[in-house]
Amino acid sequence: MKIWTIANQKGGVGKTTTVAALAGILSARGYRVLMLDCDPHASLTAYFGYDSEKLNYNLFDWFAQQPMTAKQVQNTIIKLKNEDVSLMPASLSLATLDKKFSTREGMGLVINKVLEKIKDDFDYVLIDCPPILGILMINALAACQFLLIPVQTEFLAIKGLERMMETLNMVIKAQHHSIDYKIVPTMFDRRTKASIKALRNMRDEFGGHLWDKVIPVDTKFRDASRLHRTPSSIYPDTHGVNAYHKLVDTLLAMSAHSKVA
């Protein structure tokens, strides 16, 4: 099982779209994929048409029902109706985790330990993170073997990236292990000077950690979310989906060279 975390401390940069897009492409290539919604706003859960407050289980159960058996974990996971992908949904109750469990020992490793119980059930786990530092992001970073940081190609998003890098360095020091990562420029519009300048600034500042391509603005992403489908399953030939295919190619090539665990 390979675990990729998709995170940024700024909202609206394409994290949920990236998770959905990668999941669809990996699934189409024959991999068993689980998406983990770690955001109390439950955007990924809503993306696929589920009302998080009406489900029998959600990610909060992983924290509240420790320890869990493999069977119990499997029962909390949703197999999507129209996609060959699975989802661990979120709910608003996740917003209470820090208050309820912050003093309980080992709470930063819950997701890591739970995923170990089902490591033979999936090839890839994609974790959609909340945009704030807390138990959920700590769990997502502790569990991940590779970190993807989507960054909208505009000035304020780059400032958010700087905060994310500070958080990443803090977690690395606290956990005494390195985390490989790749910064992914998103929502790139080659018609605007702002996008071009922002991309140039990212290349100057982050160098080799920046993916050498971009995810362009693509209105079909919004249409796919409205239809509760992965972009590649319903709009396979758009510029945006083709860009995500190239990103998957990059990540799988890195995996083959043991950089993406």
Image (tube, helix red, strand yellow):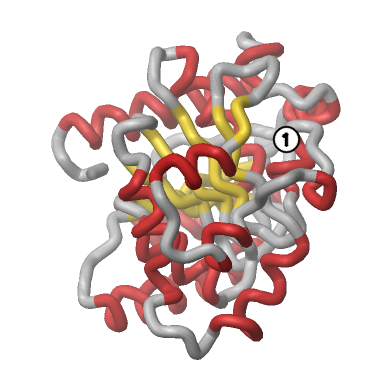
Amino acid type assigned to the residue bearing label 1 in the image: Arg
Residue that mark 1 sits on: 191
Left or right, 133 with reference to 26: right
Mark count: 1
Q: Secondary structure at mark 1?
A: loop
**Dividing the image into 4 quarters, which one contains the C terminus?**
top left
Give the percent coordinates (x, y) of residue 157: 64, 62
For the residue carrying disc 1, how many other residues have a C-alpha within 10 Å: few (<14), some (14-19), or many (20+)?
few
Residue 179 lies in what quarter of the image?
bottom left
**Dividing the image into 4 quarters, which one contains the N terminus?**
top left
Q: Is residue 96 above or below residue 12?
A: below
Q: Is residue 33 above or below residue 234?
A: below
Give the percent coordinates (x, y) of residue 99: 65, 85
Q: Is residue 175 above or below residue 76?
A: below
Front position in the image: 255 or 67: 67
Left or right, 225 with reference to 25: right
Residue 119 lies in what quarter of the image?
top left
Q: At 64% across and 65% down in the image, what residue appears?
A: 131
Tell me if residue 172 can be seen.
yes
Q: At 59% across and 21% down in the image, what residue appears?
A: 241
Q: Residue furthest left?
A: 257
Front position in the image: 142 or 22: 142
Residue 92 lies in what quarter of the image?
bottom right
Q: At 71% across and 71% down in the image, what residue appears?
A: 95
Give the percent coordinates (x, y) of residue 228: 77, 26
Front position in the image: 35 or 75: 75
Tell me if residue 210 can be seen.
no
Give the percent coordinates (x, y) of residue 210: 40, 50
Q: Is residue 255 above or below residue 4?
A: above
